[in-house]
Amino acid sequence: MAVYIYSVTKIEYGTTTGLATLGSLTALPDTVKGSIAIEETEGASVKFYVDQKKEPIKVVKTEEGEMAVTAQFYDMTGTALAAFKGGTGASGAGFTPSTGYTTVEKGIKITFDSGQTMEMYNAACMARYTGGGGRDKMLAWELKMIPQVTTDGLGSYKVL
């Protein structure tokens, strides 16, 4: 029987543990309809040729592809923005960005309607504003999450 994965029901985040596990998690706001993308880029390889043949005699993979998840949110609650952009935020609409470069790493859990979950134990997270402020557009913020290897070296993400 085929297995299908579809429809994100929630995205949660927490502090990284350094291990291939997740600690306690906090739910992110509802996502903008159609904004979630889960993609893996193509890896890199090197081809080795000889003069006498048109095809390579060997192709060696040199890099794996990069997994990335992006999602957008309309909810501008300051605590969520501060968690991913750095700075300080209030439980309401207040947010003050950090004054320098901020590195954000979080544990991420994505739950699907189909019953599976995706866990990223040490995701590099980058947030930015997007959208607009016109009468027909609403300002949103976008979160990009890229799994990194854990400090114990035992993993980066898995789909359960």
Image: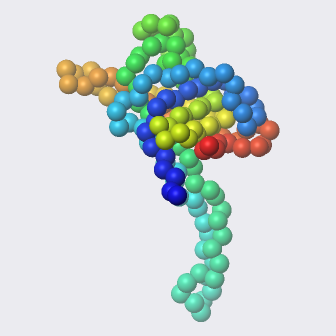
* Nearer to the camera, 89 or 15: 15
Using the image, determine if residue 148 lies above or below residue 63: above
Q: Residue furthest left?
A: 135
Using the image, determine if residue 19 lies above or below residue 84: below
For image coordinates 60% across by 66% down, the residue present is: 45
Q: Residue furthest bottom?
A: 52
Specify whether residue 101 is in view. Answer: no
For image coordinates 80% across by 38% down, the residue present is: 152
Q: Quadrant of the C terminus?
A: top right
Question: Is residue 151 rendered to the left or right of residue 50?
Answer: right
The picture quadrant where one finds residue 21 is top right
Using the image, determine if residue 155 lies above or below residue 140: below
The spot of residue 84 in percent (x, y) is 54, 23
- The colour style of the image is rainbow
Label count reads 0
* Nearer to the camera, 37 or 8: 8
For image coordinates 59% across by 31% down, the residue present is: 108
The spot of residue 89 in percent (x, y) is 51, 10
The spot of residue 77 in percent (x, y) is 45, 13
The picture quadrant where one finds residue 145 is top right
For image coordinates 42% across by 9% down, the residue present is: 93
The spot of residue 48 in percent (x, y) is 63, 77
Specify whether residue 2 is in view. Answer: yes
Question: Is residue 34 rendered to the left or right of residue 104?
Answer: left
* Nearer to the camera, 48 or 58: 58
The picture quadrant where one finds residue 83 is top right
Q: Residue furthest right?
A: 152
